[in-house]
Image (spheres, helix red, strand yellow):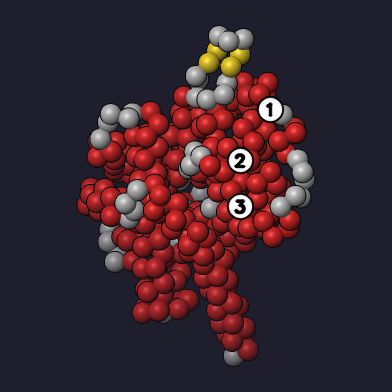
Amino acid sequence: MENGRIRSRQLAVLVIYFIIGDMLLILPSLTISAAKQDGWISGGMGLLIGWPIAWFLYRFSRLFPKLTIIQYNRRLLGRWIGGLISLFYLYYYLVTTAMLLREAGDFLTTQIFTETPINAIHFMMIVTLVWGTKSGLEAIARSGETFFPLYIFLFLALFVLLLPQAELSRLQPVMGEGLRAITHGSLYSSTFTFCELNTVLMFLPYVVTSKTTERDYLIGVFLGGMAICSIILLTLLVIGPNLASSYLYATYAAAQKINVGNFLQRVEAILAINWILSTFFKTILDFYAFLLGTAQLFKLRDYRPLSIPGGMLVFGLAFAITTNTVYFDYIVDYYIFWDFTCAFVLPLMLYVVYKFRSQTMLSK
């Protein structure tokens, strides 16, 4: 089914890509809209909430270290109930892939390639996704590791270039919106970043485990979370809460403020390149999870023949799932509950079933 193996360091890199993902552009707007100038506090609170969830996902995967969640659903809950929950996860991976594809198409056609049809953007991304999944998990991990130094360099360059535009006064008054608004903002930063990590349950069995695997995974989670917190803080410092909450892509608007000596200007492509990289790896991992899980559920020999039909399905679904960016902004709140269910509620239920069955077997 999947013969490739990835190392702990590659796992950490993929986790960083996955946590940052599309949230590099989307999350600051959502968080700041809810918490205003206290959005940076919401980001920190989201890290405190999300890091234990990410740790729980890893420990949960160790119950059956050689099986994906699709496989041990049926082992714990039986053929029919386990199969239904597996279908629920597969639908989640499919819809998430389509959502990410549509996000990329909307951003590129509204901000950069304004004369390019969104169909063309989607088609090029689908071709890359199909090619990547056919190459296997090991090739995906190696590609991520290859691009990672460039990704870090551009990320740090963005901060250095924007620091002259930062003003601490834009964070005042601290706690001015109250705890309720801060908690609301933290829901976005904890679910859309850490809860969506439930996808790792599909490829953790293919990690070559060592004494440092859990440590590397958690370091990746922490660094990805800190990057998200930092980008929320930087967006607030540069353009303030009023502008940030009115932009769909607040981080991109902040990057457009780069001006070094009236010479180095309009280099927001730095952010766009980083966003495309992290979004691509998040999308391909969700797409891989959908294909691999489908093959495992229906007991196929290989998932690769499903790549092209799966790509065609995602291509069509990306248009059907949302009509425009306004509608997308409306439905995004409901995604919180879906992410939390897949990352915590269902794994916790499976963990309870596992413990109950283990105690029952011991008592006999």
Q: Dots 1 and 3: beta carbons under 8 Å?
A: no
**Percent x, y of residue 44:** 70, 48
**Left or right: where does residue 253 sit relative to residue 112?**
right
**Marks 1 and 3, how far apart in space?**
21 Å
Q: Which mark is residue 34?
A: 3
First in sequence: mark 1 vs mark 2 = 1
| Residue under the image location 31 percent in, 60 percent down | 295
Q: Residue at x 50, y 20 (%)?
A: 267
Image coords of residue 26 (percent x, y): 50, 43
Q: Position of residue 72 (x, y in %)?
A: 46, 69
Name the outermost residue toward the bottom: 364
Q: Amino acid at mark 2?
A: Asn
Q: CA distance from mark 1 to mark 2?
A: 15 Å
SS of the residue at dot 3?
Answer: helix
- In the foreground, 116 or 212: 116
Residue with the mark numbered 1: 166
Residue 125: give x, y in percent of width and height: 31, 38
- Of the residues shown, which amino acid type is indicated by label 1? Ala
Report the Cα–Cα distance between label 2 and label 3: 11 Å
Report crowding for label 2: few under 14, some 14 to 19, many 20 or more residues within 10 A (C-alpha). some
Local secondary structure at mark 1? loop
Report the residue marked by disc 2.
242
Name the quadrant containing residue 349: bottom right
Residue at the (55%, 12%) spot, across then down: 264
Q: Earlier in the sequence, mark 1 or mark 3?
A: 3
The residue nearer to you, when weighing 228 against 344, is 228
